Image (cartoon, helix red, strand yellow):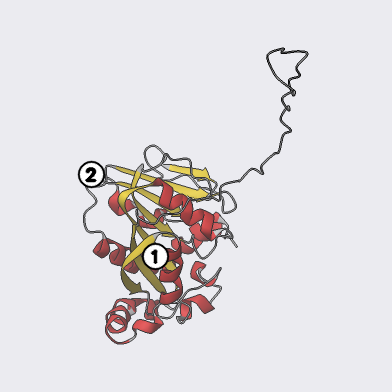
């Protein structure tokens, strides 16, 4: 179930959303410290986490699913966001170096097709960074945040899904250890909760962040091939020659 893009925007404009964006963006930057010379695609609602790469990456793009809706971004300069079918991305094969998926995998009704499209557009050795709600964390149990919608995952479920679609998980990180409460005093202590959680409460993070690489060997087609049934056509039978037609043939 895709969330409306206006609801996603409003969440990230709130105090809770700004704190969540700050902490999760720091974790994403720690996993991808340098994207110079790389092309980056954000899929889902990834724009709150893309700004830090503008001016560094060679090219930054964003694709928002049709059922979610789209908002222009960034507010300054030319827009880099497109409304797209997540199962048929409007990009050429092997054309993207990095893909960041946020508010995407847990919402998509066609996860296999979406991951197949990500595999198709990624270059050889390309990297995928997936952010999904943690099934055991408090954020997935609260519908007051975008991470409380859709299908939450455990680490094993998410990594298994990636392997099934020809991605090799490389490392797993976690973020958002503080409960999703909107009290200002609580939000002021979020950074401290993050430090404690990363040390002692790994299983109860709000989100799981998985980096994976495109697997080139043993790959399967992104979409099943349609096999045409065999058609049997009658072949003309050769006429049996007779002695009257060909005198040199003996009966």
Q: Position of residue 60 (x, y in %)?
A: 34, 45
Mark 2 → mark 1, Cα distance in angstroms: 29 Å
Residue sitting farthest toward the front: 250
Q: Is residue 135 left or right of residue 239?
A: left
In the rendered image of this protein, does residue 52 appear above or below residue 163?
Answer: above
Q: Nearer the viewer, residue 78 or 129?
A: 129
In the rendered image of this protein, does residue 78 appear above or below residue 2?
Answer: above
Q: Tell me the number on the disc at residue 219.
A: none
The residue that appears at 71% across and 25% down in the rendered structure is 238
First reached walking from the N terminus: tag 2 or tag 1: 1
The residue that appears at 31% across and 63% down in the rendered structure is 28
Q: Position of residue 193 (x, y in %)?
A: 32, 82
In the rendered image of this protein, does residue 20 appear above or below residue 90?
Answer: below
Quadrant in the rendering for residue 158:
bottom left
- Is any part of residue 130 visible from this angle? yes
Q: Nearer the viewer, residue 239 or 242?
A: 242
Q: Which residue is mark 1?
A: 18
Q: Which residue is mark 2?
A: 37
Quarter of the image where the N terminus is located:
bottom right
Residue sitting farthest toward the right: 244
Packing grade of label 1 (10 A; few <14, some 14-19, many >=20) is some
Q: Is residue 218 left or right of residue 223?
A: left
Q: Position of residue 160 (x, y in %)?
A: 43, 70
Mark 2 in CB contact with mark 1 (< 8 angstroms) = no
Mark 2: secondary structure: loop
Q: Nearer the viewer, residue 123 or 101?
A: 123
Quadrant in the rendering for residue 74:
top left
Number of numbered callouts drawn: 2
């Amino acid at each position: 179930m895709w969330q409306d893009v206006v609801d996603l925007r409003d969440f990230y404009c709130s105090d809770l959303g700004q704190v969540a964006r700050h902490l999760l963006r720091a974790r994403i930057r720690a996993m991808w410290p340098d994207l110079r010379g790389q092309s980056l695609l954000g899929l889902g609602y990834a724009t709150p986490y893309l700004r830090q790469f503008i001016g560094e990456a060679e090219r930054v793009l964003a694709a928002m699913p049709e059922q979610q809706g789209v908002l222009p971004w960034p507010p300054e300069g030319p827009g880099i966001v497109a409304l797209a079918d997540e199962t048929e991305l409007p990009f050429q094969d092997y054309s993207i170096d990095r893909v960041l998926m946020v508010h995407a995998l847990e919402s998509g009704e066609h996860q296999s097709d979406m991951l197949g499209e990500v595999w198709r557009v990624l270059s050889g050795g390309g990297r995928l960074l997936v952010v999904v709600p943690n099934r055991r964390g408090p954020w997935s149990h609260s519908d007051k945040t975008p991470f409380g919608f859709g299908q939450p995952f455990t680490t094993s479920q998410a990594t298994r899904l990636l392997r099934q679609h020809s991605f090799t998980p490389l490392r797993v990180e976690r973020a958002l250890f503080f409960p999703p409460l909107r009290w200002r005093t609580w939000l002021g202590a979020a950074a401290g909760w993050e430090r404690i959680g990363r040390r002692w409460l790994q299983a109860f993070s709000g989100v799981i962040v998985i980096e994976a690489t495109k697997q080139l060997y043993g790959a399967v087609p992104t979409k099943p091939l349609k096999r045409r049934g065999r058609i049997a056509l009658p072949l003309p039978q050769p006429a049996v020659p007779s002695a009257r037609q060909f005198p040199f043939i003996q009966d």
